[in-house]
Amino acid sequence: MIVLAAVSTPVPYASTQQAIGYPTLFLLVLIGALVPVVPTGALVSSAAVVAFHQTAPLSLLMVFVVASVAAFLGDIALYWLGRRGMGSKNGSRWLEAIRRRAPEDRLAQAQAKLDDHGVTVLVLSRLMPAGRLPVMLACLLSKMPLRRFARGNLPACLAWAVTYQLIGILGGSLFKEPWEGVLAAVVLTLLISVVPSVWRRVVR
């Protein structure tokens, strides 16, 4: 894992660490965008903690660039696969995966917001826990062109990468040891993901 490798590798091997770490971060975030079971926010926050403790210049900038590009490409690929499924008589497993993770109530809310605010709702969807896929499905059902989706999704991915990187920087600044900051960042990002869904169940 990128986090464990980055924490345990001595500083003299920073160049080797980065050569392995950045491609690994890219692949994990890309896979997480396609298969929404990987906690990509926690990955980005953890990588930001490690970069914060490194002396190598531009480490934080590289984490931001790698994470945002991977998230953007993953979203575009998933949307393209979803559009293919919409046009197919038999659908597709990718489209079905999106549908399974977009409950009817969340989908209805996403469609209403999409009608009111257009592609700007993509930015909020990327920052809200479990908000990305309902909005993506709403875009698919409205037959939004891929190019228009990409224009709205780019700032969404940039905002997402900045948000989770700031969480990582906060964790890194509070603790002297990188592993402590990584643990704090992971716990915080998981709480951000879990608490809203638990709260919705409680108020029901």
Image (cartoon, helix red, strand yellow):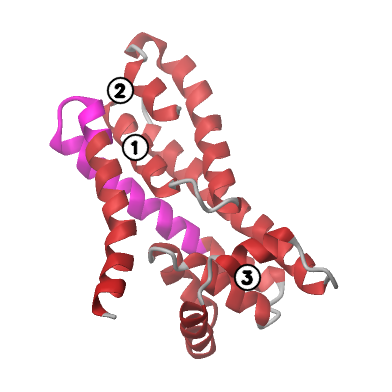
User: Which image quarter is the N terminus in?
Assistant: top left
Foreground residue, 123 or 197? 197
Bin the neighbour count of mark 1 within 10 Å (Cα to Cα): few under 14, some 14-19, many 20 and up. Answer: many
Indicate yes or no whether the magenta region holds residue 154.
no
Cα distance, mark 2 to mark 3? 38 Å
Side (left or right) of 30 relative to 113: right
Asked whether 161 falls inside the magenta stretch, the response is yes
Q: Mark 3 or mark 1, which is nearer to you? A: 1
User: How many numbered circles does the render carry?
Assistant: 3
Depth check: give the residue in front, 163 or 41.
41
Up the image or down, 98 lies above or below 116; here it is above
SS at badge 3: helix
Image position, residue 183 (x, y; %): 25, 35
- Amino acid on which disc 2 is placed: Thr
Magenta stretch: give its range.
155-182
Which quadrant is home to the C terminus? Answer: bottom left
Lower position in the chain sequence, tag 2 or tag 3: 2
- Between the C-alphas of marks 2 and 1, the distance is 16 Å
Predominant secondary structure, magenta span = helix
**Badge number at residue 55:** 2
- Kind of residue at badge 1: Ser
Residue type, label 3: Phe
| Pointer 1 residue | 46
Residue named by callout 3: 149
| Number of the label disc, if any, that sits on residue 201 | none
Q: Which x, y percent locates residue 193? A: 34, 57
Q: Name the front one of labels 2 and 1.
A: 1
Circle 2 sits in a helix, a strand or a loop, which is it?
loop
Q: Residue at x 38, y 29 (%)?
A: 3
Query: Label 1's element?
Result: helix
Residue 51 horizontal side relative to residue 169, left or right: right
Q: Position of residue 67 (x, y in %)?
A: 48, 45
